[in-house]
Amino acid sequence: MKEKWVTDRTQADFGRLAAKFNLPPLIIKLIVNRGIKEEDIEEYLYGTINSLSDAHKMKDIDKASDILKKASDKGDSIAVVTDYDCDGIFAGMILYTGLKKAGAKPELFTPDRVKEGYGINRRIIDEAYGKGISLLITCDNGIAAAEEVKYAKKLGMTVIITDHHEVPFLACDNDKRNYIIPPADAVCNPKQADCGYSFKGLCGAGVCYRLMGILYEMCGIPEDEMNILLQYAAIATVADVMELSGENRIIVREGLKLLSHTDNPGLWAIKEVNEINERDITPYHVGFIIGPCFNAAGRLGTVKPAFDLLTSDNKKEAYDIALTLKSLNDYRKEMTEKGACIAAGIAESPRYRDKDVLVIYIKDCHESIAGIVAGRIKEKYNKPVIIFAEAEDGIYKGSGRSIPAYNMYDELAKCRNLFCRFGGHAMAAGMSLPKENFDMLEKILNENSPLTEEDFVSVVDIDAEVNLRHVSIPVIESFSVLMPFGEGNREPLFFGRRFSIVRARIIGKNSNVLKMTIADSEKTSCNAMMFDNMDNFLNDVERIYGTEQMEMMLRGAANDVCAAFTFNARINEYNGFRNVQLIIKNYKIIPDSKKL
């Protein structure tokens, strides 16, 4: 994959801003590089939950809260229709917990991933109606369910939609769009064109969190009762890979503080079985450990264990359930590795080598991991990817992941006639289609691709070029004001244009980590770790410098190997000692003859 290293050259009066906010100029530069304007720096640094927009400005949220308040006052049963991914699970738990606290009798309903696919369906509506439930609320789904909502309304049910996905539309002349809004009693989704809520990036759980905040106010429920709901919203925001900017950053920062010291048995147990003992929970723990355990329940079975865990009030019971979820996730990892390997092989075949959009069918792939595999292949080739698996009755189910230059939802909408159903947003989508339409989909997406060769070049955004003496423990500690790091609020990435490799050795259980000591042109040295691309790096060293030089480097002997690196700078603590450690992200081998 081609890479283009770009050092951010955003201009500002860093000295003045540093004095104004009493921060080092480097920190101000890092903030400005994230697109934060001067008038928003205060909120970026010190925003709290009270800094969130007025929830009442969200379209239909007052209608929804009035309906829920009346139902709660009467102790009515309410059907909460969730999705089976992490956002759906925690959005469902926010509604379940909040409605129960308000006095209602909520009951959770979730579609069967394999048999029914995403979102509310007639089976759920009929089941709720058969139980005498007349009020139904969706979370993380429903905006694309106009027909299902019509059906529920014909039965006399009251329907509330809460969602964050793109609103379906029909393209009209002059590039205008005719948006299709389900005929529900209230539709709460910031993505609606006429919604007055200024922040459009909430996940499904975030929308539910704002709705329950209004309901709690109406019911006189103490503000601190929102803490568990905030933890749920934070987990969902990270797990659904939402940008950690604006309100999402506040929700995650404040929610993870609570999660670090949670007294919820289920959340305690999932941390315990995964041996997360850190004092401070970070987006990494949620995105790569906690979230996948909950996602695995919906991917490989039913979401019941996930809800059982979150509703448990017994630590022993919660621990046992958490072990089950961890085992499911371990199995999911094995399936994903196998699927990604097969998909990469297909992507390298002559049929796909020159395609802009990789539309790939994998035989015997479990449909639940299609999205993860698509993400892996997208990262490998920096192309939009849709992975399909065969479901029942000749139907292919697929999941797509995209790149910034390609709005996947819009491109799929142009060939909506090929699908049984589809939904999503610019960077990700889910769909199903008759298998006879597979080749046509691939043909249309590639023939109409707006992508250029430049779009396939992965841009590496670098915050600053530094010498190693600039990267001290106090400087790294000052990065804490920028946290939490994640999608849309990246960890600072630095660049050094010429490092010599003092020594290097291969470590790790699977011998897949390269530990190095590197030195810059000022002879300042530092420890560095390469967790990704080790094999490619060593192969390139051998190709450019020869086997002897590579072996000398690995023995710690004097050698001629030089490289440019991008890296994150962190503090490594071991046996009471603290030192700077660089995490190598990208590299360029520098031949002897090349002077940068």
Image (cartoon, grey):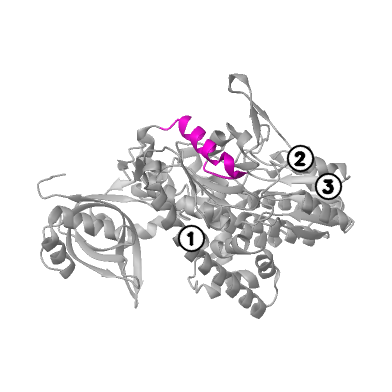
* Residue at position x 70%, y 39% in the image: 57
Along the line of sight, which residue is nearer the eye, 20 or 329? 329
Which residue in the protein does label 2 denote? 147
Q: Is residue 482 left or right of residue 193?
A: left
Foreground mark, 2 or 3, reads: 2
Residue 178, by quadrant, is top right
| Circle 1 residue | 336
Up-down relation of residue 450 to residue 540 (above or below): above
- Tag 2: residue type? Glu
**C-alpha gap between disc 1 and disc 2:** 34 Å
Farthest bottom residue?
316
Residue 185 visible in the snapshot: no
In the image, the segment drawn in magenta is: 427-451
Q: Amino acid at mark 3?
A: Ile
Residue 415 picture quarter: top right
Q: Decide which of 267, 127 is in the foreground and name it.
A: 127
Question: In the rendering, at what x and y percent does residue 350 appear?
Answer: 36, 43
Q: Secondary structure at mark 3?
A: helix
- 434 in magenta: yes
